[in-house]
Image (cartoon, grey):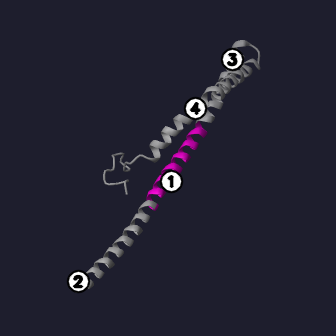
Amino acid sequence: MAFERIANNLKRIKSSFLSFGEVSAEYYKLLIFEKGMKAGIGLVNGLIMAFFILFFIVFLSFAVSFWLSNLIGVPSSGFFIVAGFYLLLFCCMLLFGNKLIERTLLVKISRKVFNDSDPDGEPNEERDETV
C-alpha cells in the first residue's frame, strides 16, 4: 500500500515536471516572439521615419542651395557650400560619431526590447523572469 502511494506520487511528480517543462517552453517561445515583434516593429517604424526625414533634408538642402545661390549671385555656389557642409558633417561623424551612435542605439533598443511593461505602458509585476 505504501509502495503504491509512493509510486503514484512519483508518477504525479513526473507528469507535473513534464507539464512544467512544456509550459515553460511555450512561455519562452511567446516571450521570444514578443521581443522579436517589438524589435521588428521598431525597425520598420525607424526606417519609415528615416525615409521621411531623408526627403525633408533633401528638399531643405535644395531650398538652402538655391537661396545661397541667389544671395551670392553665382548659380552653383550655394550647391557647393551645402555640399561642403555635408562633407564636414560626414568627417565629424566619421571621427566622433561611432561611439555616440552606438551608445544611443544600444540604450534605445535595450529599453524597447527589455521593457517589462504591458501595452498600456504600466510595469507588469506578474511576470517572473527568474525561472
Q: Which residue does the numbered mark 2 point to in the structure image?
A: 2
Using the numbered discs, state the Cα–Cα distance from disc 4 to disc 1 in whole angstroms: 25 Å
Q: Give the number of the mark in front: 2 or 3.
A: 2
Density class for disc 2 (Cα within 10 Å; few <14, some 14-19, many ≥20) is: few
- Secondary element under disc 1, as helix, strand or loop, is helix
Q: How many marks?
A: 4
Density class for disc 3 (Cα within 10 Å; few <14, some 14-19, many ≥20) is: many
Using the numbered discs, state the Cα–Cα distance from disc 3 to disc 4 in whole angstroms: 34 Å
Using the numbered discs, state the Cα–Cα distance from disc 2 to disc 3 in whole angstroms: 96 Å
At a point 64% along the width and 24% down the height, the residue shown is 92
Density class for disc 1 (Cα within 10 Å; few <14, some 14-19, many ≥20) is: few
58 falls in the magenta region: no
Q: Name the mark on residue 106.
A: none
Dot 2 amino acid type: Ala
Query: Which one is earlier in the sequence, the residue at label 2 or at label 3?
Result: 2
Are dots 4 and 1 in contact, CB under 8 Å? no
Are dots 3 and 4 in contact, CB under 8 Å? no
- Secondary element under disc 4, as helix, strand or loop, is helix
Q: Which residues are magenta?
A: 29-52
At a point 34% along the width and 72% down the height, the residue shown is 16
- Quarter of the picture containing the C terminus is bottom left
Q: Which residue does the numbered mark 4 point to in the structure image?
A: 99
